[in-house]
Image (cartoon, helix red, strand yellow):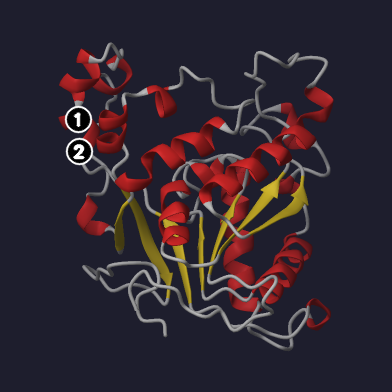
Amino acid sequence: MKDAAIPSDGPSDQSVTLLVIRPHPDDESTATGGMLAHYSACQVRTGVVICTGGEEGEINDPDLDPVADKPRLREIREQEVRDACDILGVAELRMLGYRDSGMLDTPANQHTEAFMNVDIIEATGRLVRIIREMRPRVIVTEPPGGIYPHPDHVMCYKVTAKAFEAAGDAQVFPEAGPPWQVSKLYAVAQIDDGAWESLLPQFHAAGYDMSWLERRPDRSQGPGAESATVSLDVRPYSEQTRRALLAHRTQVPKDSFLVSLPPDLRQDAFATAYFNRLSPPSAPGEHEPGLLEGLS
C-alpha cells in the first residue's frame, strides 16, 4: 500500500505506524522532517524517539545566555523537539534518556552517561520497550556508521538495529512487554542528486556564498538518486519543515542556510528525502514508491 493510513494494531493511545529514531533533538526535523510531515498529511500515525538530550549543542538563541543557560540546555531542547514534532504532526514522542556524547574526540566523550559509553544491551532493552509499546510497522533511523561520524549517530544505528531484531523475540527482554515484529527497517540515505550543483546560479543570485560547496573535493561524487530504495517528494512540506527547524531556536539561527532560503529555492534545494531499506535488505536496483509499500 502506498502512502495511505494503515492500522498499527497497537493500543489506540500509543500505537504508531511509522517510527523515526534519531540521536539528537533537531535531527527529526532535518533529513526526516519532510517525510514525517508527508506521512502525517496522509493520515499515517507517526512517532519519534530521540536518544539523547542534546546537552552538547550550541546556544544560538539570542534570548538565552550561552553560559548561564547551558546547565538547562537538555530541558530547553526537549521542549524544542516537542514543539517541532507538533509542527510535523507527530503523534508520539519519546526521549530515550541518554546524554549527548559531543563531537568525536571532545571531552564530552568521557562522560560516563554519554550515549556512546552506555551498555548497548541496556540501551537496546530500553528501546525495545518503546517499540513494543508503540508497535510500529516501519522504523527509520541512521545508516550504518551514522549519517556522519558523530558518536551518537553511530550508536543510534547500532542500538536501533539490535532493537529491531529483538523486539519480535519473546525470549529477549521479556520484561519489556509482549513481542512485536516490525515489518521493515530503513535508514536515511546520503544521496548526491546534483540538485545543489544545478542550483548554484540561483544560490548566487539570492546572495548566498557557496564557495564551501564549490571547493568541496568530493562534490557530486556521492551515491546517486538511483541508489536509494525510496525517493520521496517532500516539496509540499518545505514550509512546515522550515518551521519545525526554527522551533529548535538554540540550534538553528534564523539566518541559517537551512531556513533562510527564498521559499521556491528552498523547495528545490530540499526537494527529495531519500531512504534505503536495511531489512528486509533491498535488492540492487530495487525501488519502492514509499516507506509503507507492501504493508496492508
**Residue 115 vs residue 33, the one in the foreground:** 33
Residue at the extreme bottom of the image, as rendered = 170
Q: Which of the numbered marks, if any, corresponds to residue 34?
A: none
Do the CB atoms of the residues marked 1 and 2 lie less than 8 Å apart? Answer: yes
- Residue drawn at (37%, 52%), measured in percent from left and top? 189
SS state under label 1: helix
Horizontal and vertical percent position of residue 140? 50, 61
Residue at 76% from the left image edge and 30% from the top image edge: 73
Q: Nearer the viewer, residue 65 or 3?
A: 3
Q: Amino acid at mark 2?
A: Gly
Asked whether the viewer can see residue 218, the reply is no
Q: Which residue is mark 2?
A: 194
Q: Is 193 above or below relative to 91?
A: above
Q: Position of residue 194 (x, y in %)?
A: 20, 38
Can you give x and y, in whole percent of width and height, for residue 292 in the image?
40, 72
- Secondary structure, mark 2, is loop
* Label 2 Cα neighbours within 10 Å, binned few <14 / some 14-19 / many ≥20: some
Q: Which residue is mark 1?
A: 197
Q: Left of 211 or right of it: where is 243?
A: right
Report the Cα–Cα distance between label 1 and label 2.
5 Å
State whether residue 99 appears in this view.
yes
Residue sitting at 76 percent across and 42 percent down?
Answer: 99
Check the image and report above or below for 102 versus 232. above
The kind of residue tagged 1 is Glu
Vertical side of 196 occupied by 186: above or below? below
Quadrant housing residue 75: top right
Considering the image in quadrants, where does the C terminus appear? bottom left
Asked if 222 appears above or below 144 in the picture, the reply is above
10 Å crowding of disc 1: few (<14), some (14-19), many (20+): some
> In what quadrant of the picture does the N terminus appear?
bottom left
